[in-house]
Every structure is written in structure tokens, then in C-alpha cells.
Image (cartoon, rainbow, N blue to C red):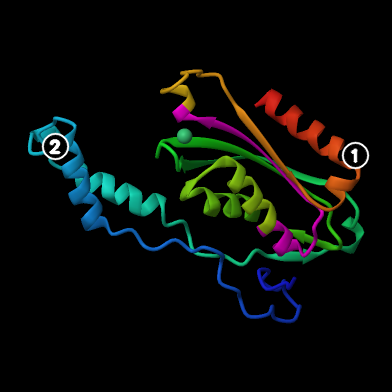
Amino acid sequence: MTHALCSPAAGESPALPEQPSPAQPTPVDTERVADLVRQLLSALGEDPDREGLAGTPARVAAWYRDFLSPASVVAPTCFTEKPLSGQLIVVGGMSVWALCEHHMLPMNLEVAVGYVPLGKVVGLSKFGRIAQRYAGRLQVQERFTREVAEEISRVIDSQDVAVAVRGTHLCMSMRGVRMEPARTSTLQAGGRFESDPILSQQFLTLVTNQWKTA
Ligand SMILES: [Zn+2]
């Protein structure tokens, strides 16, 4: 593991050259998407030339372009804070949208991250950016949870990372079984979060308390 994903804090030596982010999505072909949306409208029995739909293909294509092209990799700032080593840090309250890859319908993912720093603390907002980057694509919640945990592990250079996600899937709420209140929870726990049941329990208690009051 390298520190390549962290930009140096003031006064520190420069980080190693940045590594390409895994699985960078290919840019969206907006012209083609607009054309296909037009065809989709026809296939759905609509007249794509009627007034209300005239601008729809271009709008939908622009939305896909923006949604599926999350901000490029931003090197998170790491601060060296020796006194904070060993403390459990939980960052919750992050909410991102992804598209379920089985139905291409939105899913809302509430994300909580826990980690135990080894002298290296990551700027809190960076976790939200990492979550956003892995959400802005066709996803499944289980893979999203793992990818976010793996990237945070790389950033803080430690396996002591846990990520809990609570998902609301429109493909469950508005189609199929139509269970609006259904929520799916996933947990990826590594390092001490896997081997230390007390630490794991502390993390889950903090997370579920946050979710209860949300
Ligand atoms: Zn689905």
C-alpha cells in the first residue's frame, strides 16, 4: 500500500505520483443517448415530437452525462495527528444517489464510515467525495460498500476500516414487491473491525443511533 492517494499536508514531503482510480468510467456519448431516448419514447408508444417531450431526450442525456461523470479523483488531505492514534472515528450522515444496475432505477445510500487512525487523519469531507465517486455509476449496494471501504483503506493506509450503508432502492419501493419502507443494510469490516467484536459493536451502535435520529 502507498500513500499515493493522499496529498501532503503543509510542510510534508510530496506524495508519490497519483495512481489512476480503479475503473474510471468511459465518458457518456450524450448524442447517442439522446437518440436512444427518442427511440425509447417511440417504443413506449409516445410521440417524441410532441411539445412536452421535444427537449426530453437532450435533458435525459445531459443528466446521464452529469450523473455518471463524478468529479475526477481528488487527493484527500491527510493530517498527521499522533495524539489521535487509536481513537475510533465515525463519520456518518452522508447520503448519495446511485443507479441500481439491475433496473437502472435510483437508490439512495446512507453511508457511515468508521476507522481507527494510526496517526493519519483524513479530512472529513473527503469521505463524502469518495462515496459520491463510487455512487455515480451503475451499482449494486454490496459492491459500493466494498469499494468505498477499499478506497478508504488505501487512503489511510490501514485495514482498520468499516463502512455501513443503508439503502433505499426504488426498484423495491415502486416496482416488484412495492415495499416502500424496505431498507437494505450492508457492512464491510476490515482489520480490527473484523477481529475485535467490541470495536465492531461500538461502531455499529454509533451508526444505528445516528440512523435512528435521522
Ligand atoms: Zn434494482
Viewer-closest of 145 and 208: 145
Q: Give the residue at x 36% y 62%.
A: 27
Q: Give the residue at x 92% y 38%.
A: 198
Q: Is residue 123 visible?
A: no
SS at badge 1: helix
- Residue 25, percent from left and from top: 44, 61
User: Against 82, is 106 above or below?
Assistant: above
Residue 199 on the magenta span: no
Quadrant location, the C terminus: top right
According to the picture, the residue beneath numbered tag 1 turns out to be 197
- Residue 200, percent from left and from top: 85, 40
Compared across the picture, whether 97 is left or right of 42 comes to right
| Some atom of ligand 1 lies within 8 Å of the CB belonging to the residue at label 2 | no
Quadrant location, the N terminus: bottom right
Q: From which residue to which does the magenta span run? A: 151-171
Q: Tell me which corner region of the image, top left, top right, bottom left or bottom right, holds residue 12.
A: bottom right
According to the picture, the residue beneath numbered tag 2 turns out to be 42
User: Against 183, is 14 above or below?
Assistant: below
Viewer-closest of 19 and 55: 19
SS at badge 2: helix
Label annotation for residue 51: none
- Residue 31, percent from left and from top: 21, 57
Compared across the picture, whether 132 is left or right of 9 comes to left
Q: Residues within 10 Å of mark 2 (few under 14, many from 20)?
A: few
Q: Give the residue at x 81% y 31%.
A: 205
- Residue 83, percent from left and from top: 91, 59
Q: Give the residue at x 91% y 44%.
A: 196
Q: Amino acid at mark 2?
A: Ser
User: Against 114, is 74 above or below?
Assistant: below
